[in-house]
Image (cartoon, rainbow, N blue to C red):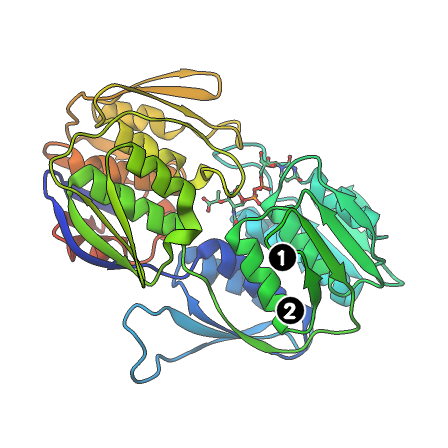
Amino acid sequence: MDRIRITGGRRLNGRIPISGAKNAALPLLIAGLLTRDTLTLSNVPDLADVRLLSRILGNHGVDITIAGKRAGQKAGAGQTLRIDAAEIVDTTAPYELVSKMRASFWVLGPLLARCGAARVSLPGGCAIGTRPVDLFLNGMKALGAEVEIDAGYVIASAKGGLKGANISFPKVSVGATHTLMMAATLAEGQTRLINAACEPEVTDVAECLNKMGAKISGIGTPELIIDGVEALHGARHTVLPDRIETGTYAMAVAAAGGEVTLTGTRASLLDSVIEVLQRAGVTVEPTNDGMRVSRNGAALKPVKVSTAPYPKFPTDCQAQLMALMTLAEGDSQIQETIFENRFMHVQELARLGAGITLDGDTATVHGGRPLTGAQVMATDLRASVSLVIAGLAAEGDTIINRVYHLDRGFENLESKLSACGADIERLSS
Ligand code: EPZ
């Protein structure tokens, strides 16, 4: 398995292009199931998760072609995918594929809406928690589907088609919002999703669905109103920039020191992350194509942060912030309110010398202790990149094992960092 070696202590200077958002590209690919026409997506990041989902969609009979880079296309401008779901040949999403990536469970909505039937493996838990799907199933039932669980599969049917309904989520769920929003576009009548997720990726998918002929209003608010239509048609859509990748590299610069301009992104996608970084003493200046991040000698100040649904501090940046706060002068408190087990990076950061104590859902980071390089293990996507951030600041060599976790969500990470001066390389074993 590939490993990454980082020799810490190098400042970062230069530019990093931000890729298209993984967490928008995945539901956008799935939205392609809703129409017989071609959905063309540009700025799609070249990630393991995107390739895996393309394979899963191929299982349903969807043809996905990657259009070559056109002359003059900006370097790092992602890839263009054409999704053709003219015929859906199989409405089963098998365990061996769904268990590899939770988001593939979301095909449940479009398959049910388009074909009136779906047999989708339960996603199972993962490193960060049990990840139940009750909100999805209750929502499908509200839309008139018959839903049962048999041998680890969700078997859903809606012979006469789905019927619009009011669905109020007891807690905010990004996946359930995506899935039910997509299903509702082809339901008969109006659907209201109350307490819907407002993440920018949900907004991006809603805007794409409207380009495909859906009638969604309230976009960007906790109440989405979807008036069902007979059918959706093809469209062209550009995936929005990845706010989590943007926040991740901002924290990498803050940890290593230096000045880096993040391009192809928007500061407005991550106000809560920028606010925390500025409180910690990092300089962050929005630019017309992203943001400039710098820390030249200023000490890092400890912060107190709780993760929460958008627009509050994203759980997907929690591990990265924890790595940064190991360098702050004083104790920081980081509370994880979304997932019940998203502190797997703590013991790995401790191997680098970090002092972190856990009390239930809150981690206290005793900053100011010097970090020294060591062998560490990546456990999930965001935990693995927190080890990269710590490795950039640690004295000596850090070897990160199981970097396949990184490849799921960070495109060309080593080349983006080494282009700014980091001493980082992939060790293929
Ligand atoms: C999405 O996961 C993201 N994944 C996650 O990013 C992100 O951490 C999460 O939203 C929260 O922002 C993608 O977009 C592909 P949820 P999702 O449903 O939709 C509970 C990454 O690193 N819940 O919003 O699976 C759930 O257990 C990944 O890119 C139920 O109880 O998350 C959790 O505690 C990690 N019942 C909370 O809701 C349900 O039916 C929020 O989960 C569904 C969810």
- Where on the picture, by quarter, is residue 21? bottom left
Which of disc 2 and disc 1 is earlier in sequence?
2
Residue 408 appearing in the image: no
The x, y position of residue 85, in whole percent, is: 64, 74
Which mark is on residue 255? none
Q: Secondary structure at mark 2?
A: helix
Q: Secondary structure at mark 1?
A: loop
Give, as a three-letter code, the residue at label 1.
Ile
Front residue of 294/239: it is 294
Query: Residue at left 68%, top 68%?
Result: 34
The x, y position of residue 255, in whole percent, is: 21, 37
Q: Ligand 1 lies in which image quarter?
A: top right
In the picture provided, is 321 more to the left or to the right than 35? left
Q: Residues within 10 Å of mark 2 (few under 14, many from 20)?
A: some
Query: Residue at left 18%, top 30%?
Result: 374
Query: Residue at left 21%, top 44%?
Result: 253
In the rendered image, which residue does mark 1 sit on? 219
In the rendered image, which residue does mark 2 sit on? 210
The x, y position of residue 352, in whole percent, is: 21, 26
In the picture provided, is 204 more to the left or to the right than 372? right
Q: CA distance from mark 1 to mark 2?
A: 10 Å
Residue 125 appearing in the image: yes
Q: Are marks 1 and 2 in contact (CB under 8 Å)?
A: yes
Query: Residue at left 11%, top 52%?
Result: 421
In this view, 226 is above or below 426:
below
Ligand 1 neighbours mark 2 (CB distance < 8 Å) = no
